[in-house]
Image (cartoon, grey):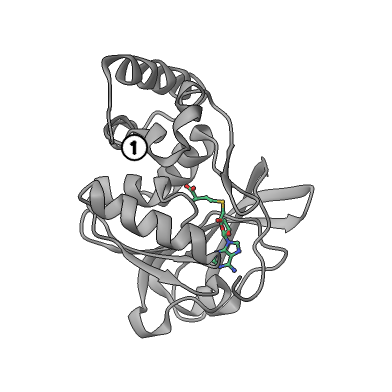
Amino acid sequence: MLLDSLQHKGLRQKLLKALYGKGVNDERVLAAMGSVPRHFFLASGLDKIAYTDGAIPIGAGQTISRPYTVGWQTQLLNVVRDEKILEIGTGSGYQTAVLCELGASVYSIERQRLLHSKAKSLLAQMGYHPNLVYGDGFEGLPQHAPFAKILVTCGADHVPQALLCQLAVGGRMVIPVGSGNALYMCVFDKISETEIKQTKLSECSFVPMLQGVS
Ligand code: SAH
């Protein structure tokens, strides 16, 4: 049963305050994160730590991103209501739910079948209706392109060209890029069909973006 108790709500508000102090200060992003009970996305015994600012195991060797990272990436994405967004790495589905709360039309790809199915049933139960796809995020979803925004939630050792191609002109992709222990948050703004502006931000940590499906 999905129960969002007063205690959970209180812990969530505390976490949001802490995120604000760390630089996640976009009110819409904070409101969206305030509306999504993060503990629903974790195994039941883990609800005590759901509102600490850490990455937590979700099975299949993967983790739900740290709340700070979710806030930071979502803020960088600057989501506008109704725009089409592609997420790579559905994982628990938490970030997907936050994007849905912001009113986006969300597509999300996951390469681990178990995580894909779990996220699919949980998000439906919570009343969210993103388009969840089991597949390889390196390929994107050409049949649904172009996307106004693309959010990669795993660390890539190179920038997937297919994703840049599927980004709309005027669109933005937020992606951690680098080698295993030296990943940097990068922002790609597609100025025109031929011009892309790249901004490299601070260091970050993510599970790796892997080829193929599992
Ligand atoms: N957004 C997720 C983060 C999960 S961790 C959340 O909020 O829980 C990143 C996820 O990316 C993992 O589930 C991993 O399996 C997935 N992943 C890694 N490489 C991928 C690829 N090539 N295509 C799709 N998903 C990928």
Which quarter of the figure has residue 54? top right
Residue 22 image offset from top left, x and y in percent: 52, 24
Q: Quadrant of ligand 1?
A: bottom right
Q: Which of the image's four quarters has the N terminus?
A: top left
* SS type, badge 1: helix
Residue beneath the point at 37% across and 52% down: 96
* Number of numbered tags placed on the structure image: 1
Pick the residue in front: 164 or 45: 45
Q: Residue furthest bottom?
A: 143
Mark 1: few, some, or many residues within 10 Å (few <14, many ≥20)?
many
Does residue 114 lie above or below 25 as drawn?
below
Residue 194 image position (x, y, % from top left)? 51, 81
Where on the picture, by quarter, is residue 13?
top left
Q: Residue 19 versus residue 23: which sits nearer the camera?
A: 19
Q: Is residue 37 visible?
A: yes
| Residue 120 percent coordinates (x, y) | 35, 59
Tell whether circle 1 marks a residue whose Cβ is less than 8 angstroms from ligand 1. no
Compare residues 146 and 191 and report the one nearer the observer. 146
Say if 119 sits above or below 33 in the image.
Answer: below
Q: In the figure, is residue 152 to the left or right of 71? A: right
Rendered view: 76 above or below 30: below
Q: In the rendered view, does 190 fall on the left or right side of 26? A: right
Residue shown at 34%/37% (left/top)?
Answer: 29
Residue at x 44%, y 32% (from the top left corner): 44
In the rendered image, the quadrant that contains the C terminus is: bottom right
Judge whether residue 150 can be spotted in this image.
Answer: no
Residue, disc 1: 29
Residue 47 x, y percent position in the rendering = 45, 26
Q: Amino acid at mark 1?
A: Val
